[in-house]
Amino acid sequence: MKTLYIIPGYGESEKMRKYKHLKTVFAKCGYYAVFLTVDWKADASIRAVATTVNKELKSYGDTKDTLLLGFSFGACIVALVSKKHTFKQVLFCSISPYFKDDLSLWSLKTLQKIKKYFGDEVFPKSLMRETFPAVKNQSAIFLVGSKEGECIDRAKRAFDVWEGKKKLVVIPTANHNLTNIHYLRRIKRILKP
């Protein structure tokens, strides 16, 4: 069975009811799903989470024949982690628009709410210039639901600067929910041999 590493969205984990069935779903596609450990309270910044995930992945050994999937804020982490590890493919699911080059998307009131939720390091770097272009040898699929607003723009802009092999998929009628039936159907189509 092949391995699929998963970085869930901010504040989420495999212990949540909505994620528990994903291991079974992905197993039917021939993948052993491993949720990477993220302590969202202790690792409050994107860099801190990426450092923790990099250490865990290193403990698993060679990753070149594995897949890495990140959802929402977890997809932002995938961009940083894929600089340190080589994967067969990375899947960016609904990348959160929380980088410096996304500031123009938000009103001042919304920015204050985002900073309250994610802390001071929510906009740590420019996604366009610093995160995505540096990865040249990774194959990537960018997935986003058609009902996701700013995440659609973020996915398109990240896709445009990705320098490796890439594909952009806008999933009709899907919202910002990895376990949405339309989202899961599309992921299963990607994973099935």
Image (tube, rainbow, N blue to C red):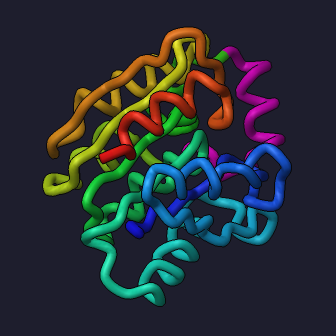
In this picture, is 61 found above or below 38? below
Count the numbered circles shown: 0
The answer, for residue 124, to whether it is visible in the render is no
Image check: 31 left or right of 36? left
Numbered range of the magenta stretch: 107-124
Q: Quadrant of residue 155?
A: top left
Residue 13 x, y percent position in the rendering: 75, 58
* Residue at 66%, 47% in the rendered image: 9
* Residue at 25%, 60% in the rendered image: 88
In this picture, is 115 found above or below 42? above
Residue 31 x, y percent position in the rendering: 46, 60
Instruction: State yes or no: residue 114 in magenta.
Output: yes
* Residue at 21%, 54% in the rendered image: 138
Instruction: State yes or no: residue 192 in magenta.
Output: no
Residue 89 x, y percent position in the rendering: 29, 53
Q: In this rendered view, identify the residue nearer to me: 1 or 187.
A: 1
